[in-house]
Image (cartoon, rainbow, N blue to C red):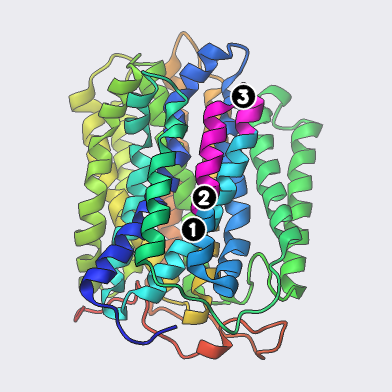
Amino acid sequence: MSSTPPDARRVTAVIGVLSLAVFMSSLDLFIVNLAFPYISKQYPDTSLSSLSWVLNAYTIVFAAVLVPAGRWADRIGRRRLFVAGLAGFSVGSVLCGLAPGVGLLIVARVIQAGGAGAMVPASLSLLLAAVPASARAKALGTWSALGALGAALGPVIGGSLVQVNWRLVFWINVPVGVAAVVLAVRVVPESRDPASKGRPDLIGAVLLAASVGLVAFALVKAPDWGWGSAGFVGLLAASVVCGFAMVMRSRRHHSPVIELELLHSRTFSGAFVASILYYAGFGAFVLSAVEFLTGVWHYSAVDAGLAIAPGPLMVLPFARVVAPRLAGFLGGPGRVAVIGCLVNALAQLLWLWRIQAAPDYATHLLPAQLLGGAGVGLTIPSLLGSGSASLTPGRFGTGSGILNTARQVGTVLGVAGLVAILSRVSRVDPVAAYRSGVVLIILFFAAAGVVSAALLTGRPVLAPEPAAPGPASAEGAAEAVPMPVAGSFSPEE
């Protein structure tokens, strides 16, 4: 890995290409929300709980692939895996658009998720490796803000495309993916960790996917089966068994799916847990907004997308400008994350107070959207910056994969919880179920704020390096000297 700082123009180009990829993957995570009604019309026997697996299958596989992909990126070359991930994502997008039914659409989404899971951790580790330490705070803000912007703009862009054909929400990825591949090969420098050895734990990744998927399936089916039914309890028990088996493998495997030593850092583990809770709220919030606007206020897909748009427009300026300055003023990104979580909780409290069946966008939903967008812009880069502050250079790929896994796990749990609540929407009083959904979202945001306040407001603590750089524990040994990374803000920056 070269120690010579790249020139400013090349750094800007690298940030742009890598941010484009994470924007595309996040966009696709939520762009399908507004396609649900149109897919249902084509396949009228498909329920919301079944359609939710078009989203959940993508997110679960995405989460399972992230950490092994981060390790492979460190080992074989981060740009190489990044380009391979982009190609896989584009192929999956083509197959999604061609799928003749919901079952095959879910299978195609799994392929798409595999590509996304490869390119996202590789993009973050490439960014951390290519950008000088002095510029990482703003670069990370741009990367994470565009990821959040992609997730939030999914309904906006999707609302326009589904008017023509719902399959376009997948095909739109293809030209963007091809352009990103060409640009990545031309402008992004290759990097790898020469000390990284050993194959990633693929069995552990399968166990992680099974554990998260079983919880999501249990939550989706609970309203029909009963919360105390044998099926629900059995799925939760199976999830715990899979999770326990994954942890035990992670303790023994040389390249585990979750590197438990990283979680010994209060800063990293705090960012990990807070991200799960925050993205559970964020994922539920995006889906709830789409379903409410189209199902209760009877907005068209385009109108619903435009109604959601003001929130995403607040994300980039708060992530790119406000969050880094606040971090310098307050003494660290962890404190900004606390503020952002509280702002999101307050936005949802405002919406809970104003929600009603009669459409009244300007005075009821718009203020909550604007406040929520500001909260997203403050929180997401701050959580990522806090977690990254505890990583040494040799763990950029692995650490970024784990942090992104937390995001996807949280999204699955939040969406599954919301689907369980909305499955009982009453025609007489449809707003009641949505109120319960908003309460769930508030609890997630508040819990993320509590964890951030408890674990992320002190001085960042570096995760310990492995004790010995042998074949079973080599990652990062060649670069064990701590390097300032995004998130370790100081007033001088």
> Number of callouts in the render?
3
Residue drawn at x 34%, y 58% is 17
Residue drawn at x 25%, y 66% is 12
Q: Is residue 234 left or right of residue 71?
A: right
* Marks 1 and 2 close (CB-CB < 8 Å): yes
**Marks 1/2: CA–CA distance:** 6 Å
Q: Is residue 107 above or below residue 198?
A: above
Residue 85: x percent and y percent?
53, 54
User: Which mark's residue is nearer the viewer, 3 or 1?
Assistant: 1
Label drawn at residue 457 = none
Could you tell me the amino acid type at mark 1? Val
Secondary structure mostly seen in the magenta stretch = helix
Residue at mark 3: 102
Could you tell me the amino acid type at mark 2? Ala
Q: Crowdedness of circle 3 by 10 Å Cα count: few (<14), some, many (20+)? A: some
Which comes before the other along the chain, label 3 or label 2?
2
Dot 2: what SS?
A: helix
Could you tell me the amino acid type at mark 3? Val
Residue at mark 2: 87
Residue 52: x percent and y percent?
57, 30
Residue drawn at x 72%, y 82% is 472
Residue 227: x percent and y percent?
69, 31
Which comes before the other along the chain, label 3 or label 1?
1
Span shown in magenta: 86-106
Dot 3: what SS?
A: helix
Residue 197 position by quadrant:
bottom right
Residue at mark 1: 83
